């Protein structure tokens, strides 16, 4: 997990969205609700992807490369998900890497996060090695993973 909207909560002090003060993540709870018990969960960072730099992307690449699993799901903010997907290309060529996130936080009503996470877990088991994105019920190759901000979704 790297943060992004999927993991944000309402901050009562500034009336905005941020990450939980205790540094916790919603992903284990989302997997529990879906009765998806097998993924290992690693919290790499809790950061808005709009503030990612190459050092953050290098840390993601290293975590993917060092993971013993051949399939890895990376939760990520939607703002720069495509940039990170393209950055990761070729960094772990023998692995299937699937990025996903949410347009609305899990902590708020009617989030797309659970749907996207479930799709990513399934896709990671079925796709060939490479870097992919799963959002809004669709699978995108890294070079086609682009957020359509006008429509509020990912499109081809």
Image (cartoon, grey):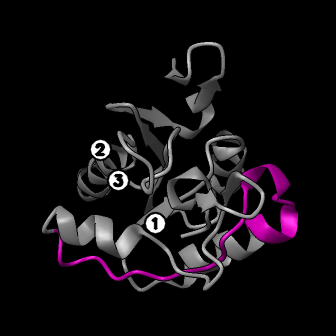
Q: Is residue 95 visible?
A: yes
Q: With respect to residue 7, does 43 lie above or below?
A: below
> Disc 1 to disc 3, how far (Cα)?
22 Å
For mark 1, does the 10 Å Cα neighbourhood hold few (<14), some (14 to 19), or many (20 or more) residues? Answer: few
Kindly identify which numbered label has been placed on residue 112.
none
Q: Residue drawn at (53%, 61%), measured in percent from left and top?
A: 7
Q: Which residue position holds label 3?
A: 117
> Which of the two labelled residues, at mark 1 and mark 2, occupies the earlier sequence position?
1
Q: Residue 134 versus residue 151: which sits nearer the camera?
A: 151
Question: In percent of the image, x 57 and y 40: which residue is there?
Answer: 142
| Mark 2 surroundings within 10 Å by alpha-carbon count, few (fewer than 14), some (14 through 19), many (20 or more) | some
Circle 1 is placed at which residue position? 94
- From the top left corner, tell me how far across and down residue 50 is, in percent: 79, 49
Residues at discs 3 and 2 in contact (Cβ within 8 Å): yes
| Quadrant in the picture for residue 145 | top right
Q: For mark 3, does the 10 Å Cα neighbourhood hold few (<14), some (14 to 19), or many (20 or more) residues?
A: many
Q: Is residue 110 left or right of residue 118?
A: right
Q: Secondary structure at mark 2?
A: helix
**Which of pointers 1 and 2 indicates the residue nearer the eye?**
2
Q: Position of residue 11 (x, y in %)?
A: 66, 61
Q: Quadrant of residue 27?
A: bottom left
Residue at the spot x=28%, y=76% of the render? 39
User: Does residue 52 appear to the left or right of 79 in the view shown?
Assistant: right
Q: Earlier in the sequence, mark 1 or mark 3?
A: 1
> Label 2: which residue?
115
- How much space separates mark 1 and mark 2, taking CA atoms? 26 Å
Which marked residue is nearer to the observer: mark 1 or mark 3?
A: 3
Residue 71 visible? The answer is no
Q: Which residues are magenta?
A: 36-57
Image coords of residue 122 (percent x, y): 23, 53
């Amino acid at each position: 997990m790297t943060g992004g909207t999927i993991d944000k909560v309402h901050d009562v002090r500034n009336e905005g969205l941020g990450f939980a003060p205790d540094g916790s993540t919603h992903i284990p709870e989302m997997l529990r609700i879906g009765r998806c018990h097998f993924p290992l969960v690693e919290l790499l960072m809790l950061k808005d992807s709009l503030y990612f730099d190459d050092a953050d992307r290098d840390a993601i690449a290293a975590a993917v490369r060092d993971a013993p699993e051949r399939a890895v799901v990376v939760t990520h903010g939607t703002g720069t998900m495509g940039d990170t997907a393209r950055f990761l290309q070729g960094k772990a060529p023998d692995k299937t890497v699937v990025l996903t996130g949410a347009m609305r936080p899990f902590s708020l009503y009617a989030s797309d996060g659970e749907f996207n996470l479930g799709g990513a877990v399934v896709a990671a088991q079925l796709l060939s090695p490479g870097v992919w994105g799963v959002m809004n019920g669709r699978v995108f190759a890294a070079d086609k993973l682009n957020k359509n901000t006008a429509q509020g979704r990912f499109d081809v």
